[in-house]
Amino acid sequence: MANTPHTLQDEFPTKLDRIHELKISNAHFAKLLDDYDTLNDRVHRAETNVEPMDSLAETDLRKQRAAVKDEIARMLGTADA
């Protein structure tokens, strides 16, 4: 989806090379990236009323997205050590 906020490129602009390296070398990391993109797209569709949902469901999606982002950030931090 074009112009979707909170893309990983926006969230980790200085880690793009490392993200790419981990994506091709670590299957779990690659799955996390896919999960994040899917959740982020769902949140964006809910926020823009393309796919409306109740506020509790939208909040749950945001929490899921944050949890996946935290795991990605943790792996990026570990990868740089």
Image (spheres, helix red, strand yellow):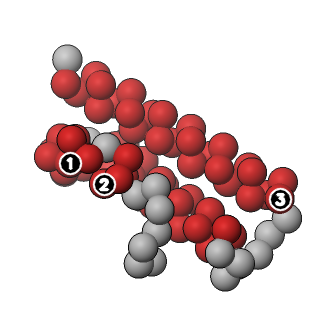
Q: Which residue was labeled with disc 1?
A: 16
Examine the rendered structure and indicate whether residue 81 appears above or below residue 9. above
Q: What amino acid is at disc 3?
A: Ser
Q: Which mark is residue 50?
A: none
Q: Which residue appears farthest toward the bottom when viewing the image?
A: 50
Q: Position of residue 47 (x, y in %)?
A: 67, 68
Q: Which residue was labeled with disc 2?
A: 9
Asked where in the image residue 1 lies, by quadrant, the reply is: bottom left
Label 1 environment density (alpha carbons within 10 Å; few <14, some 14–19, many ≥20): some
Whichever of callouts 3 and 2 sits on the residue coming sooner in the sequence is 2
Q: Position of residue 76 (x, y in %)?
A: 29, 32
Label 3 environment density (alpha carbons within 10 Å; few <14, some 14–19, many ≥20): few
Q: CA distance from mark 1 to mark 3?
A: 32 Å
User: 47 or 77: which is nearer to us?
Assistant: 47
Q: Quick check: marks 2 and 1 in contact, CB under 8 Å?
A: yes
Q: Which residue was labeled with disc 3?
A: 55
Q: Position of residue 4 (x, y in %)?
A: 46, 69
